[in-house]
Amino acid sequence: MSASEEGLASLARPFVRMPRAVAIYVGAIVVLALVLVTGVSVGRYAVDPVRILDIVGQSLADPFRDLAEVDERIVMLVRLPRVLLVALSGAALAVSGAALQGVFRNPLVSPQVLGISQGAAFGGAMAILFGIWGLPLLAIVFLSGLSALALVGFIARINGRSEIVTVILSGMIVGAMFSALVSLAQFLADPNGPLPAIVYWLMGSFASTTWERLFVAAPGLAVGMILLWALRFRLNVLSLDEAEARSLGARPDVERWLVFALVAFIVGSQVAVSGIVGWIGLVIPHAARLMVGHDHRTLLPASMLLGAAYLVAVDTLARTMTAAEIPLGILTALVGAPVFAVLLRNHYRDRTAK
Amino acid sequence: MTPTLARGLGVAALLLGTVVPAFSQDITFTDQEGREVSLAGPAERIVTIPMPMASSVIAIDGGTDHLAGMNPVSKAAITEGILGKIFPESRDINDSVTAANFVPNVEELAAVNPDLVIQWGGRGGDLVDPITNAGMTAMLILYGTEERTRGYMGMTAEALGKPERFAEHEVWRDAVMSEIEAKTKDIPEGERPKVLHFSRILNGMSAAGSGNNYNDWYINLVGGKNAAADLEGSKPVNAEQVAAWDPDIITLNNFEPGLTVQAVYDDPVLSLTSAAKNHRVYRLPLGGYRWDPPNQESPLTWMWLANIVHPELFDFDLRAEMKSAYKTLYAYELSEADIDSILWMDMQGDAANYDAFQAD
């Protein structure tokens, strides 16, 4: 496959790319910082920028002070946790997409391929259907996402090992099954009661973010991301042919499942607090690959920065453009699909031109 | 209207109802999708698929005798609410004729053998064709405005062969409406309190906007101003937007199970709105049906909200009005305890201006 050829090529000359990569990182960090500051500064409730600096400054000096005013609470309890959670989710989703694409040696896979998102969605739909909210809902979503992966593992493991193809097919089976169960939950739900709640939740939104939710999701997102980063060398090896990988001393089967479990941790944590947010894991790694190449040592951090900046930018639009919150999943798909199409065409046009 | 007169009309209707079929006079009217609905005589077995219609049929008919099937969600609402207490036999009415999502189960329907099926209009043929293809008569209704509500309640009364029941009901709606309107229509924009209705608030909030939205309509009727008028229909919003609107009064929906006004007081941002600071947060009552969407008890909703929004203008004796309405609608004597539970006295008895609803 061509992706692995290029992966090998970039492995062979890692240092040639470094200066360019450094420039790209600096640029990405600046963009991310700008987006984060903008995210905290704008919203439907007008707060003066000087006042925001004052509020944030006071809270840095005394993190546990009493927030009595509306503008203080909006900046410190609504915008700040939301922007941070969105950034963390964007980074983690992009990294999981990049890792999965490496493992499957296929640029078109995303966390959806493993059925994790659908499993988590099912947990959420059932919880809402039975009127379960708050922390128990998050726990149910997270566990059902993990159990979807466990199911994929069980189905795909034949004669003690699982081939890539059987994993993808098992993921499709499990994903389709959980999608059907989500539909069943919607079918059973009262159209005047839980049904709209399920529908909005499935569309994805960070509107109900609190510090509590940030702390619930942060461990899964951060640990998942850090461990995937720790596996960056193994990801380079895994993205080679199965035989090549084995010859380089890898145990592709075990390591693959380790990556899958980390991705399930990330996706389960994210879906639990904000519903289904698609396309990040597909679009961002592509953009990052065009900028820094296929080496996971540079690809993962680039995906992280881009994913965070992109999702914060989209979420800021979602909550400020109209008086109504625009469900985030709609925007990521509306923006993501055309961007992906352009990237794809440019990428292959350049390659064929060579 | 006095209860005696209402009773008298009811008896007259009953007599008419028994006489008319003897001539097997056709009943023909046009439903809200412009279709002609034709019945060989007053409908004896009605199936209601839209949620609020089961209790409306009971109210218009004055009993459950002609309700042959309903939505499982309607049945849950009836058996768990006060109607289950008034009409215990409603527990035995078929609720397998449709799924909660309004898709009819034709075999079950055929087994129930209804002479009229009430179904939503404007939602595509999939909900209607199975009924008509099986040779059953469907009456299609549209949701949202007072005008539509009166339209389909009138049609239902006509189908039941009791047009006078609705005529009587409409007199009540008109009387309450014009009494309220007379006091509110000249209130200048600046003196109308901003009212925000949350159609959803647990785990994400949605606010009721304008357009063909009943909540918006009655907020304006009672002399309020919809804080979320920028939105079209019910749309998700964030806390920041609610803070920017800063509503004077917040009303909560009746659909989310277990919802209490504490949801507003516990939220760091919502609790700083004028509404929360002045204890003007209220959950819509749950009577024979939920008081937020249009139904046979809507005038009670208007009077309840009028007392809350403009206590200086309105002084409805809601408890007395409820007793008389329940007598007319369901031939039932409401106890003081019934009223307390309908109005959520335990939960919000201490809210601002709610003392107007306390028992003497």
Image (spheres, coloured by chain):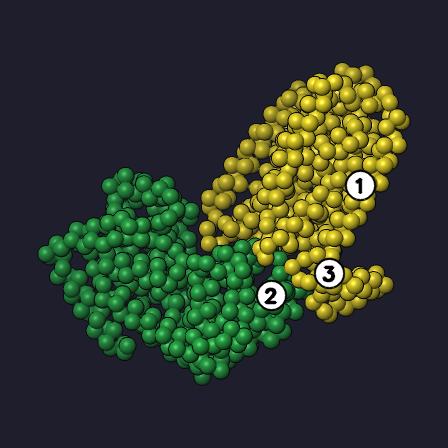
Q: Circle 2 sits on which residue?
A: B245
Q: Are marks 2 and 1 on the same chain?
A: no
In this image, B117 relative to A242: left or right?
Answer: left
Instruction: Return the chain for callout 2.
Output: B
The three-letter amino acid code for the residue at tag 3 is Val
Residue A115 as seen in the image, left or right of residue A60:
left
Residue B167 visible in rendering: yes
Q: Quadrant of the N terminus of chain A?
A: top right
Residue in view at x 78 percent, y 19 percent? A245
Q: Is the C terminus of chain A in the top left, top right, bottom left or bottom right quadrant?
A: top right
Residue A2: which disc? none
In the structure shown, which secondary structural element does the residue marked by tag 1 occupy?
A: helix
The quarter of the displayed image where residue A66 is located: bottom right
Q: Name the residue under label 1.
A: A28
Quick one: A267 or B198, which is closer to the camera? B198
Residue found at x 51% / y 60%: B209
Q: Marks 2/3: CA distance?
A: 17 Å
State the CA–CA distance, disc 3 to disc 1.
Answer: 25 Å
**Front-lying residue, A218 or A305:** A305
Q: Label 1 lies in what chain?
A: A
> As drawn, is A67 to the left or to the right of A154?
right
Other residues around mark 3 within 10 Å, as few (<14) / some (14–19) / many (≥20): many
Question: How dense is the environment of label 1, judged by Cα within 10 Å: few (below 14), some, or many (20 and up)?
Answer: some
Q: In which quarter of the image is residue A230?
A: top right
Query: Residue A105, position in %: x, y?
Result: 71, 23
Q: Which residue is the extreme one toward the front?
A: A353
Label 2 secondary element? helix
Q: Which of marks 3 and 1 is nearer the N terminus?
A: 1
**Marks 2, 3 in one chain:** no
